[in-house]
Amino acid sequence: MTTNAMQGRFWKGLELQPDSRDILARMLSNETDMMFRRRAFILFSYLGLKPEDVVLEAGCGRGFFLNMARALSPCCLTGVELDAEVLEEARRSLAHKEVELLSADIQQLPFSDAAFDKVLFTEVLEHIPDDKRALQEIFRVLRPGGTLALSVPNARYPFLWDPINWVLEATIGRPIRKGILSGIWANHERLYQVEELQEKVREAGFVVEEARLATYFCVPFAHNIVYGIGKELLVAGLLPKSLSTAADRFAYSENKGSLLNPINLARGVFLAVDRLNDDLPMSHSSVVITLKARKY
């Protein structure tokens, strides 16, 4: 999707320069998770990266957001990740990107007070046993005036995103948290309501400046398709080269976009459905909650 095609309430509310939008659109051209795609635009709008910024990604995973951050700005980047295997993958992928990567527990960060101007904290808080402690640590390492860009899964997620867990929660009150059918609850301690999240962030000392919902309309079983099946096959190296190239978030420049490739064809369907989210009102349920907060 080009900058010119980004119309509607969702896009008009984002504070991103056209060149930054173009960079993100290009780097997300291999993205099949429409929720990931939308929250990337929101979170980088919140961060507003500048060359002089010192930035932390708390829970950087395989380094996808750090890779985008480096393309957007020559700022000083640090990522922390507790999973040793995932951290090694990030180090391989970002080997020439001038990014510092460390093994660390977010509940006890190895940094001095006020060490960072901005912190990116996306789809991590729900995994942490003590989320209050994690938010307090993020607050501690941010300088006064610093920005937190946060996202978590919404407890009011749409039925079609994860029908199995939606029904289980509505009936027996117990979701599937592990395995191919785990969906939005995969390895999560909790999901969040908007008001609950804002209150926890405020309790940590932050001032909440904005909260947004993203992704209601979706392909049925989207989470199970993209993560329960697609991600597992990609990580295990079980996809043919042409399919893995079209699915790999780091290989966007190698994908020619041919619709004869099933991954590209599927992505086209996902994108067509996702465009309905361009005018999503805040009253809807959604897959993700994003939040911008500041330390004063």
Image (cartoon, rainbow, N blue to C red):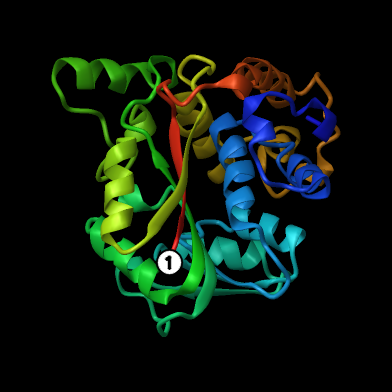
Identify which residue, 213 or 92, lies in the foreground.
213
Asked if residue 38 is positioned above or below residue 271 in the image, the reply reads below
Q: With 217 as the anchor, is 40 left or right in this view?
A: right
State the image coordinates of residue 194 (x, y, percent, origin top left).
Answer: 34, 37
Secondary-structure class at tag 1: loop
Quadrant into which the C terminus falls: bottom left
Residue 128 visible in this rendered orientation of the protein: no
Give the amino acid type for the residue marked by disc 1 in the picture.
Answer: Lys
Please give the name of the residue rendered at 32% of the width and 18% of the height, measured from the top-left corner.
164
Identify which residue, 77 or 113, lies in the foreground.
113
State the image coordinates of residue 159 (x, y, percent, origin top left).
Answer: 38, 16
Please give the name of the residue rendered at 27% of the width and 48% of the height, measured from the top-left corner.
199
User: Of all residues shown, which one is farthest toward the bottom?
Assistant: 112
Toward which corner of the image does residue 113 lie, by quadrant? bottom left
Q: Mark 1 = which residue?
A: 295
Quadrant into which the N terminus falls: top right
Residue 221 visible in this rendered orientation of the protein: yes
Please give the name of the residue rendered at 75% of the width and 29% of the height, measured from the top-left corner.
6
Asked if residue 277 is positioned above or below residue 132 in the image, the reply reads above
Mark count: 1
Few, some or many C-alpha atoms within 10 Å of disc 1 (few <14, some 14-19, many ≥20)?
Answer: many
State the image coordinates of residue 177 (x, y, percent, origin top left).
Answer: 27, 36
Q: With 258 as the anchor, is 41 left or right in this view?
A: left
Q: With 285 as the anchor, is 12 left or right in this view?
A: right
User: Of all residues shown, which one is farthest toward the left?
Assistant: 172
State the image coordinates of residue 65 (x, y, percent, origin top left).
Answer: 61, 54
Please give the name of the residue rendered at 76% of the width and 34% of the height, measured from the top-left corner.
242
